[in-house]
Every structure is written in C-alpha cells, then in structure tokens.
Amino acid sequence: MRRVSVFGATGSVGESTLDLLAQRPDIKVAVLTGGRNVARLAEQARAHGADLAVTAFEECYRDLKAALAGSGIEVAGGPGAVVEAAYRPADWVMSAIVGAAGLAPGFAALSQGRTLALANKESLVTAGPLLLAEARAHGATVLPVDSEHSAVFQALVGEDIAAVEKVILTASGGGLRDWPLDKLAEASVADAASHPNWSMGQRITIDSASMFNKAMEVIEAREFFGLAPDQIEVLIHPQSLVHALVGFNDGALMAHLGAPDMRHPIGYALNWPDRAHLPVSRLDLAKVARLDFAAPDTRRYPALELARQVMAAGGASGAVFNAAKETALDQFIAGHIRFTDMAPVVAETLDICAARTDMGRVPTTLADVLEIDAEARVLAGQAGLRRHRSHSGAA
Ligand code: NDP
C-alpha cells in the first residue's frame, strides 16, 4: 500500500492534504507532524490511523502524548523528532511546515529518495540549488505544490523547457490592493491578513498583501524550472483563476485556469504523473465572464524588486532575503513596525549582508544555510528595531 507522510499537517496546506487523503482508502498515512496545535494533530492522527504523530515543540510533547493515550499511535516531540520522522518509510511526503523549519525535514526525505511534494516555499528560496542537488543525488523527485508552480509544471508536460520564452505568475494583489498608497503605512495586521480569494494561513496572507509571497515565488520559479530572472514576469490578476501562463518561442501562451483551491495542486502532486478525480469546484467561464490583468506597481509592491536583486546576487542572498522577510513579518505582526516597513527592513538587511564578506559566501551545506539564516535574522531584527525607534522618536 502506498504510504504518505504530511509535515505541517495542522496548517492550511496540511488540512487540505488530509482532506484529500480522507477520500483515499488506498493510501496509508504514516507520519503526521504539527506544531503547537496538538489537539488538532491528535484528532488527525486518530482519524487517519497514522503510525506516528510528532509535535515540533518539546514542550507540547506531554499534551500530545496525553491526547493520544490508548490509541496505539507512536508520539514524539521536538525539531529533531520531526527530522527523524522524515527518514521513516514513505512513498510521498508533503512538505507543508511554514518557514525555515521546513528545510531539514525536506532534505531528510530527499536523502531517502522520496517524492517530495513541496509547499514550503522557503526550501527553494533559501537553498534551491542544494535541495535540487540532494534530490538528484538520491534519485528523489520534487513536485511543486504552490498553485502557480504547479500550473507552470502542468503547462510544461511534454514540452521542451528550451522552447519556453517566459513564465508569467499571477498575483491577486492581496487584501490591500486597492488601498491608496499613502494609507498603506496605516494597515493593521487584520487588514493585511484578509485575502480576497484564497483561504490561507495568516503569515502567507500578509505576505500576499505585501507581495513578499510573489517575490518568493519568482525566486522559487527560477530555481525549480532553471529559468533566467528576466524570463519570469508577474501580473496582477484579481480573480485568481488563471494561476500561471507559459509563453513559448512560437508565440503560444498556455494558461492554467482553475478555482482558487489548494486541493487542486496538492491533488495533482498526489496523483502525478496521472490525473485523478478531485473534489474541487469546476469553473463556469460564462459566469466568470471576464478575466483582468494588470502590471504590478512596484511602489506598492517593492518586494518584487527585491526578488530581482536577490536573483541577480545569487549565493546566500536567498537565505538572507527569507530570514529578513520572516523577521520583518514577525515584527509587523507583533506591532513593532508598520506594514510599509517590511520591505525597507529586508532591503537594509540584504545591503548589510552584501557588504559583509563572511555573509557573501555561497552556502554549500544545509548547516551553512541555517547559519546564514540565523545571522540574517539578528541583522533584520536590529534593522526593524531602528525603524521602530525612528517612528517612536526614541534615540
Ligand atoms: P500554516 O501556518 O497554516 O501551517 C504551518 C504548519 O507548520 C502547521 O502545521 C504548524 O503547526 C507547523 N509549524 C509551525 N511552526 C513550526 C515549526 N517551527 N516546526 C515545525 N512545524 C511548524 O501554513 P500554510 O499551510 O499556509 O503554509 C505552509 C507552507 O506552504 C508555507 O511555506 C507556505 O508559504 C506554503 N504555501 C502555502 C499555501 C497556502 O495556500 N496556505 C500555498 C502555497 C504554499 P501548528 O499550526 O500546529 O502550530
């Protein structure tokens, strides 16, 4: 029987994955991991008859153990236990932990030659070349789960990548798309965390409003498909029905359309290379009636320019970018900096790191990446603090 493990099971992508797996009695759920939501993790583990449930936080282990008492399900806790779980036998592994914490389990799964369904954006942005080399070295497969990358991947079936002129990733523009530019600095966490079309976790929804999410996706697309930076474009598409387009050298433009429902790209990765029935709503184009597209305004979305800077610089800059972005996001959520401070904090951190010879090294191991990540978080934290002080008028 096919065995599947879900890392980040209690999150938005994890829940969608389990929703699909609930309809697949032909698949055995091996490992489920979560973070602090141990009550939900225990519920999921019981409902799916998992072999092992792991919380990434040692302090949550006792609660998980208690919640699964008498179930016969093995329980573990701590970041090391999450990585160990990735060495367990599985045919297909969903990487849906949020943030840099998703890297090590992904690498572990690839070292075992698994098929890795990659939702965790941070993996390709911070360690793309290393991750793909690990997959090649162990005969493992990486499948994209981000809806845009899945769309490109599907449009490329049977095509020669050399015939691709460009890839266009679409973006809804996020919850603040229509706000006046001079009001953006006043956007609250709740304003930024409301998405017009997609239902996602809080962090990715705010990243969608700032377009840091799209910036990450541009870098991901470059790494995954091996494209040149100027082959990747972004278009605002408010309806979120066209997920991506691929332009070929004969002038053809292939678009992937579908309802904004993550169960489609997850289900595609689960059934790949085949297609299977999925319980997602079908588009009625006559009802949709119109599809709008517009070029993004880089004054509203400075993160897109930062992505270009990162792709031009290469080396450690992806890891610095992601770490600084996560830190700036934490500071915004905590109320320490404004929505419009996030991009300057990331830009400043990139500049500081570019000027430091010790931060300019090309990471050659996962440990290198994690070290750069940790250093960049400290620098971004300091940059955020400076902005906080300048707003509050402190010295
Ligand atoms: P969520 O925040 O909804 O879920 C994150 C998951 O990771 C939860 O299971 C959470 O556990 C767990 N987690 C949190 N911190 C840690 C940690 N330190 N170590 C291990 N596990 C941890 O995120 P999403 O599902 O929205 O996104 C997951 C990833 O997929 C992200 O990288 C995101 O960018 C990407 N992605 C998401 C999409 C979406 O539609 N949501 C679309 C495409 C990509 P708990 O909740 O129990 O604390």
Image (cartoon, helix red, strand yellow):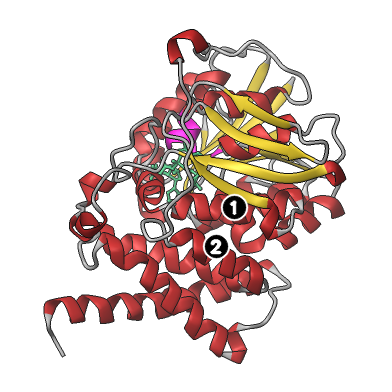
Q: Nearer the viewer, residue 174 or 287?
A: 287
Q: Nearer the viewer, residue 236 or 84?
A: 236
Q: How many numbered circles are shown?
A: 2
Q: Is 115 left, or right, of 37 in this rendering?
A: right
Place of residue 57 in the rendered image (x, y in percent of width and height, measured from the top left): 41, 53
Q: Which mark is residue 345?
A: none
Mark 2 and ligand 1: say if the CB distance to the nearest ligand atom is below 8 Å: no
Residue stretch in magenta: 7-15
Q: Is residue 235 visible?
A: yes
Q: Name the residue beneath numbered marker 1.
A: 218
Q: Quadrant of the N terminus?
A: top right
The structure residue drawn at horizontal position 43% and vertical position 28%, both measured from the top left corner, is: 239
What element does badge 2 sit on? helix
Is mark 2 in CB contact (under 8 Å) with mark 1?
yes
Q: Is residue 62 above or below residue 300?
A: above
Q: Name the residue beneath numbered marker 2.
A: 307
Whether the magenta-drawn stretch holds residue 11 is answered as yes
The structure residue drawn at horizontal position 86% and vertical position 46%, both measured from the top left corner, is: 162
The structure residue drawn at horizontal position 50% and vertical position 26%, both measured from the top left corner, is: 241
Q: Is residue 242 above or below residue 335?
A: above
Q: Is residue 65 above or below residue 257?
A: below
Residue reaching furthest left?
Answer: 393
What element does badge 1 sit on? helix
Ligand 1, by image quadrant, is top left
Place of residue 78 in the rendered image (x, y in percent of width and height, measured from the top left): 48, 54
